[in-house]
Amino acid sequence: MTRTEHLKFCSICINQKDDMRKGIICGLTDQIADFEDTCGSFAEDSEVIEQLKLKEIENEVNDKMASQGKRFLNYLLDLVFIVIFILVFYFILGIILALVAPSTLSDMEEGNKLLQYLVSFIVSMIYYTSFEAITGRSIAKYVTKTKVVTEIGEKPNFKMIVIRSFCRFIPLEAFSFFFNDGSGWHDTISSTKVINA
């Protein structure tokens, strides 16, 4: 067998040992492998196998990652849908206030900035959290045929989605896509990725 063929076994063996000069050697003999067909002391390292499988899955997820163009389109479309949801929210709130407390309508009409920011934050959090927690997709992600997954391609849990949604409000977060592999801070902080569905 060649050294490369030996390493297919040795790199996943529980008896392996790293040597600065020789590379991977047998921890039992302190020598480079020299067996022909099989090694009598070969014992598979389940941790190494699991790490290799996770790395392979992670590479598959990375290969499916959505392009920056799709991510930017998601951002723009979601922004449009959020504005629509905010307008609907204000419309319903206006009807309720007109029936219950008409005097508070004048406060809304004056353009209370704090109230506007608060409503925008709440509606955006509800929009992203509810859609992505239930389906893994916002409305824009349905349009662009993308979805949110964990770093190993699974459906994110609710906590990850809440963190993801909350991180969208970090100042300058929208520009974070330009600094690395196309992932924003809301992706990296929540350990999620957006892939092509």
Image (cartoon, grey):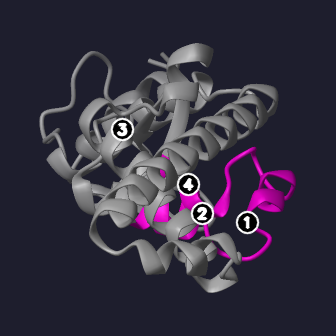
Taking depth in this image into account, of 187 and 181 the one nearest to the observer is: 187
3 w.r.t. 160: above or below: above
Splitting the image into 4 quarters, where does residue 79 fall? top right
98 w.r.t. 139: above or below: below
Mark in the foreground, 3 or 4: 3
Rate crowding at label 4 as few (under 14), some (14 to 19) or many (20 or more) other CA atoms within 10 Å.
many
Q: Is residue 84 left or right of residue 79?
A: left
Splitting the image into 4 quarters, where does residue 57 fall? top left
Which numbered circle lies on residue 187?
4
Please name the residue that numbered disc 3 is placed on. Answer: 131
163 w.r.t. 101: above or below: above
Instruction: Say if mark 4 contacts mark 2, CB within 8 Å.
Output: no
Q: Amino acid at mark 2?
A: Arg
Taking depth in this image into account, of 132 and 1 the one nearest to the observer is: 132
Which numbered circle lies on residue 168?
2
Please name the residue that numbered disc 1 is placed on. Answer: 173
Q: Is residue 42 left or right of residue 114?
A: left
* Badge 3 or badge 4: first in the primary sequence: 3
- Kindly report the distance in space between the C-alpha atoms of the residues bearing marks 3 and 2: 15 Å
Indicate yes or no whether the magenta region holds residue 167.
yes
Q: Residue at x 46, y 37 (%)?
A: 58
Q: Residue at x 37, y 66 (%)?
A: 97
